[in-house]
Image: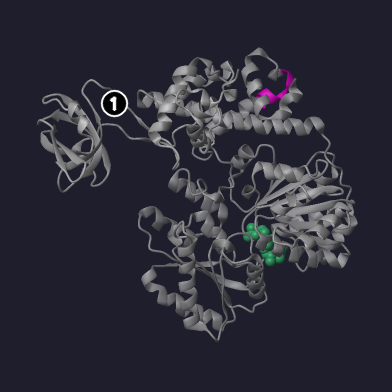
Amino acid sequence: MSLRDVSVAQLPGVGPKRLEAVKSLGINSIYDLLFYFPFRYEDMEVKSLDDAIDQEKILLKGVVASEPVVVRFGYKKNRLNVRVLVENESIMITFFNQPWLKDKFETGEDVAVYGKWNESRRSITGMKVIGSNEEGSIDSVYSVNKSIHQKTLVNLIKLAFDKYHEQIDSVIPQYIVEKYQLMDDESIVKGMHFPSNEIENESARRSAKFREFFLFECGIQSVKANDEQQNVGLVEAYDEKYIAKFNESLPFKLTNSQSKVVNEILADMKSSHHMNRLLQGDVGSGKTIVAVIAMLASVTAGFQTAIMAPTEILAQQHFEKISSLLEKLQIRTAILTGSQTKREHDTIVENIREGKTNVIVGTHALIQDSVDFKNLGLIVIDEQHRFGVNQRKALREKGNNPDVLAMTATPIPRTLAITAYGDMEVSRIDELPAGRKKIETYWIRSQKVEQMYKFVSKQLANKAQVYVVTPLISESEKIDLKNAELIYDKFNELYAPKYNIGILHGKMANDEKEDIMNKFSHQKIDVLVSTTVIEVGVDVPNATVMVIYDANRFGLSQLHQLRGRVGRGEKQSYCILIADPKNDVALERMKILTSTNDGFVLAEEDLKMRGSGDLLGSKQSGLPDFKVGNPIADFNILQTAQIEAEQIFKDPQVMNKPENKVLKLFLNDEFEQLNNFD
Ligand SMILES: Nc1ncnc2c1ncn2[C@@H]1O[C@H](COP(=O)(O)OP(=O)(O)OP(=O)(O)O)[C@@H](O)[C@H]1O
């Protein structure tokens, strides 16, 4: 029996309550528990006193120089004091409320103490003590929540490991394990949770990363193989002349780059090859019109087409653009979102089902069960990384294997995109429309904010429209809102009633938000103060000034996205970053932003600066989430894993070889479609 089928309830001491607690961490089986790895390790390497930093944790080693003394104070409180000679200096160690640790300090014996260093007192508030006969260890730190403690979780993992370690089968085929000198799964689990030393942990981490990437790549390859096997891609025989005429009727000429990707997309749609394409293009590079052309082509081929956007504001904006372009061609468009009345919803859904509507714009509402298409030919997914694989899959299942065009403005280096989205082909728009001017970006410290007010006054007098963005400062929406409101009041005080000031934030009802956005795009609002709801995709070409408060709180790619809301027309645009960077990295970021407008250059700079970069860890990453591996920092491992997975899937017979048996079983469990390989 696979450990994935063994419940955590099989462990001693696990009743319904504890079971619920581990489930809240997403742990359902013994397998999940064993592979629930620490998210970091405490550095338990012994340091010298010279390296001690005030208020930071450190592990020091020395000789016990005094009898430990326990002093009681207050109600039930006590303090254990002991002196330890470290590098010839007598250091005071204090532990609070752990009197039993007394036994670990024998005068004259070696001891190591982990704790917080106090520089002025030359003392340590102890957190952990390692006696002379014990080995130093690396401490694992797990991500837990209110319902379960670190210690409880560690104990459960220990219990599970002791009881089941012999049943941990290695999923990575042996020849791959040998080729890359990886650990088997049992050793990975041991080395990730309870490493005896740094070397063991390093090796386990490297193997765990490979394992994670390899299984991910197997998933991608299996979807790809499935697609190829079925090969039931739609042939969308679109009307070429009609499309050419439409392109000529546009108020602008497509850039060479746009024409190139349009051709790639249309060629895919026309062939029986199933299209699964990622369209990348920097902010403002004109992805929307490319999507509209593809959608129109699908309609001329007799199909319905849908575009799914991550927010209502974006869906609304797409709808306005698309319907204004297509309705004059007698193409019926509709928008479907979660905030419509039941009556509206029902009518729209019925029209979609009966094929009366050709082009549907929507949010997640499109994937509800109630929505059925008559003949869906092409799906466009905007800001695709904001949707999970399942949501994308659900939309795809609304048709008979429709073509898929996913769009993203996230600058992911090409090699990385191909590896992380191995099942997709990548098209890239790599130039901006002609006539665009470089957005002039300035950085000021908050004490110089008056300069910004003056600048904004001048710009307003020149009929410019201005965005003012305030970040999410805290977890509490209330405080963030207050922050935005304070700034809104300030702008009113300075510029109203001569100019109209508006405010936009996440707490507002959708129709209120829409109303404000409409007013802004029709120039009835001059200054729009907003929290980051404005972030992606909003397109108001007349807005030419972007002011970003507390800019150091945003990541580079997010700042780039925000800045991309201006500079969308031919007028000179400006971005003013207000920030008081507290360290070199933050300072460097401001400098980079003021020096370049190119998203890909920014992404690369970011990588150089941070190793893994801002691209990761934030919702902006545009990359799948991994638990152990980091697709940027560990790119080599990712690439190797991809090559090996590809080899296995090249020929269906390979999967049936005995060396791949465990892997096959594992994947069959994970991806049902793999049953095709039986
Ligand atoms: N070839 C072109 N020449 C001139 N203007 C263009 C061209 N293509 C698109 N535009 C205009 O440029 C603006 C930006 O285009 P669009 O909204 O499609 O950008 P995007 O790539 O979706 O950017 P973002 O990722 O920021 O949403 C729009 O106002 C659009 O009408």
Question: On the picture, is 178 further left or further right than 552?
Answer: right
Element under disc 1:
loop
- Can residue 550 be spotted in the picture? yes
Instruction: Indicate yes or no: mark 1 CB to ligand 1 under 8 Å.
Output: no
Residue 13, quarter of picture: top left
Q: Where is residue 533 in the image (x, y as percent from the top left)?
A: 57, 62
Q: Residue 330: percent from the left, percent from the top? A: 89, 64
Task: Tell me the quadrant of the picture where the N terminus can be found.
Answer: top right
Q: Is residue 649 magenta?
A: yes
Measured as percent of width and height from the top left, residue 559 is found at 52, 59
Ligand 1 lies in quarter: bottom right
Residue placed under numbered mark 1 in the picture: 136
Q: How many labels does the image show?
A: 1
| The one of 143 and 420 positioned closer to us in this rendering | 143
Q: How is the image coloured?
A: one colour
Q: Which residue is drawn at 59% across and 51% down?
A: 410
Q: Which quadrant is home to the C terminus?
A: top right
Residue 265, compared with residue 658, is above or below; it is below
Residue 654 placement: quadrant: top right
Q: Decide if residue 266 is in sight here.
A: no
Of residues 606 and 135, the one drawn nearer to the viewer in this rendering: 135
Classify residue 149 by image quadrant. Answer: top left
Please state which of residues 526 and 396 is positioned toward the viewer in this rendering.
Answer: 396
Residue extent of the magenta highlight: 646-653
Kind of residue sitting beneath label 1 = Gly
- Image vertical order of residue 193 relative to residue 434, above or below: above
Whether residue 185 appears in magenta in the rendering, the answer is no
510 relative to 182, above or below? below
